[in-house]
Image (tube, coloured by chain):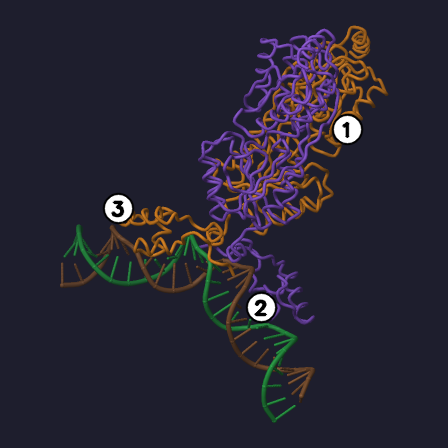
Chain colours: A orange, B purple, C brown, D green
DNA sequence: CTATGCTAGTAAACGCGTTTACTAATCAGT
DNA sequence: ACTGATTAGTAAACGCGTTTACTAGCATAG
């Protein structure tokens, strides 16, 4: 067992104030009203001894830790970093501590942290994953109480969820490009198995379907990384499907794509227009500043913490937070020559 | 007091294995060797009951939490995000949990977290601050055992410290610019009261002093922010001191500076060369990719965690981790016309 | 004068794992 | 056969705050 801790204990305060430890505890926690005189004795003693309850004892006693866990793939990634900042702030407002864990998308670690959660380490867990699940994660999540899933889905997990409205984001991006005159659109998505990718693609599809002659003529899928953005860009240039605009599924993809286009001598937005997703990476600092669908990152964090504190409904809620288009300078009407091609296609269809 | 927690307790395991709780505890913690048979009985019981020690009880008993705290100004900032990632990884390797707190540079919060640390919440604290101290922080840090200061100093704090070699970084940046032919150099620094700023400036000064005719002809100080980079850039253009190269004290400053130069029609590196510091922000994605002094962020995290685990020496150590210059395409020889001015100055001096 | 209620607290159990100091039993050595 | 050491554990104290159930003493109501 432990050596005595350094600070004063509740019984020291009790002795100094000539009351019982119970009185001190209950007074400090507001479950006992005392005479002015006794209360003052206690407060003086607390101040004099610089008493603060031993958090470990308190947690053992209460059976909770007033701390939540955040599990995410990688804090160094700007999107997750911002998410973490939002959650930290919300947790702090709720007077909850936050313990942070990065999984680097390794499933072993993910399961590990869920386990720690179950063993009462923390009162709740906000979980972000980033890879397709083979069912292991679903089962682990369903067996763990007090987990909230955010940003990306784990299909079949019966836990509260907070996502952004990916479909609407895809739709807004598509509508914006279509309204600017584009008809041959490319899609650079995240991993094809992920909900975010599918929904963003679906939203784009919905927008395109509303405009006769418009088509998603090219698409690619891969991890949400810079390298994948570059790879997709190269593939696009190679296959040359006459795309005049690209909707990319994340900032990272845009960041990887842009230099490839520049290398190839394609001007943005003169030759090709771009809309990104997330709007966290410094898209506004690029040349040109890139338009993007903005995720409500702060709200996601806020809602996640709120859901953790609230009682679990059945079935667990799945919230969709609205996104919006942030227009910058990466979208312009398509170049005339290619535009004519679109018009031809447009004529064939109606 | 608490309702019973859900899982099995040590006494359940003990009962199932027909031994005492002490035996279970000591066996699992490796302080008791048992006969093969008894050991197996315990292990079977542990598995069957899915026993894992209640962490709160364990921490109360041990008087420590196997958890460290990280206090930093803002996780959303890419530099701190990467630092956090490095520390999280190092902590994980040391089997330590990490609780995260953002101060947003508010002193009240900083003191708060030091307090929490003192009250045994965590076994150690890695502290990053970003503003000049009026002595309050110094006093608080000196009163708190188990704090490590990293990245930026709090003068007078007698705690272990891990910094990068700022002076050397400034020197390397300066030497690089001088070697490329620059003689009239500008410095855009962080807050003038900060150690990092002073040291980086000093290193630049040392390099410049070694080359006759070279001078730091212009300098400015302000927060490590994008906005400040832009402001400083505008001020530089305004005062027009004939600077051909700029050493900026952080990535953020570069990111803010670049668009201003571009607006003004100045090409980088054609008209003006730039070297940044940190090399975390996506300097390699800019056009042109910007050269910078790279901080050994992972090593800083690693060392900080290592120092926390080691016994405190007296006086506490202050480690300086090496930086290096990462060359990209933002430095070129100065334009000829201005170069001639430099040569003139060069002639006056020897 | 008794019953009821209120005030101002308190004793003791409880959460649960860890550790010290100790015992009972067996074995080796002489 | 006796001493000393080793083996295989164990009882009980400890870390410390919280909470339930209870009491002693006084006041009000009937």
Q: Which residue is mark 3?
A: A36
Q: Residue at x 82, y 15 (%)?
A: A242
Question: Badge 2: how crowded within 10 Å, few (<14), some, or many (20+)?
Answer: some
From this viewpoint, which residue is outermost toward the front?
B350
Residue B92, position as x, y percentages in the image: 64, 46
Query: Does the residue at mark 2 contact the one at mark 3 (Cβ under 8 Å)?
Result: no
Can marks 3 and 1 be said to lie on one chain?
yes
Query: How far separated are the C-alphas under marks 2 and 1?
Result: 56 Å
From this viewpoint, which residue is outermost toward the right?
A238
Q: Which residue is mark 1?
A: A228
Q: Residue at x 49, y 59 (%)?
A: A3
Question: Badge 1: how crowded within 10 Å, few (<14), some, or many (20+)?
Answer: many
Q: Which residue is mark 2?
A: B15
Residue C19, position as x, y percentages in the image: 54, 64
Residue B310, position as x, y percentages in the image: 60, 50
- Relative depth, front residue between A105 and A239: A105
């Amino acid at each position: 067992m432990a050596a005595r801790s350094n600070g004063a204990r509740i019984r020291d305060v009790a002795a100094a104030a000539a009351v019982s430890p119970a009185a001190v505890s209950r007074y400090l926690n507001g479950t006992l009203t005392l005479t002015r005189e006794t209360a003052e004795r206690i407060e003086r003693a607390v101040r004099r001894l610089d008493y603060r309850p031993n958090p470990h004892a308190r947690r053992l006693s209460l059976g909770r830790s007033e701390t939540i866990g955040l599990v995410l793939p990688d804090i160094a990634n700007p999107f997750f970093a911002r998410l973490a900042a939002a959650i930290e702030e919300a947790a702090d407002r709720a007077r909850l501590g936050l313990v942070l864990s990065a999984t680097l998308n390794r499933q072993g670690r993910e399961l590990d942290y869920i386990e720690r959660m179950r063993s009462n380490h923390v009162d709740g867990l906000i979980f972000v994953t980033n890879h397709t699940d083979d069912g292991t994660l679903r089962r682990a999540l369903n067996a763990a109480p007090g987990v909230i899933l955010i940003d990306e889905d784990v299909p079949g997990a019966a836990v509260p969820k907070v996502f952004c409205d990916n479909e609407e984001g895809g739709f807004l991006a598509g509508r914006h490009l279509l309204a600017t005159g584009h008809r041959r659109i490319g899609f650079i998505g995240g991993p094809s198995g992920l909900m975010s990718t599918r929904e963003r693609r679906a939203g784009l599809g919905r927008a395109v379907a509303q405009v006769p002659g418009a088509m998603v003529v090219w698409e690619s899928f891969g991890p949400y990384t810079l390298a994948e953005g570059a790879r997709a860009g190269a593939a696009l240039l190679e296959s040359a499907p006459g795309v005049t605009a690209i909707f990319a599924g994340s900032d990272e993809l845009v960041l990887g794509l842009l230099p490839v286009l520049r290398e190839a001598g394609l001007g943005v937005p003169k030759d090709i227009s771009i809309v990104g997703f997330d709007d966290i990476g410094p898209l506004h600092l690029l040349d040109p500043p890139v338009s993007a669908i903005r995720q409500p990152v702060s709200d996601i964090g806020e809602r996640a913490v709120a859901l953790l504190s609230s009682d679990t409904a059945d079935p667990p809620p799945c919230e969709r937070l609205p996104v919006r288009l942030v227009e910058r300078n990466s979208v312009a009407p398509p170049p005339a020559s290619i535009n004519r091609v679109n018009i031809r296609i447009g004529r064939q269809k109606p």
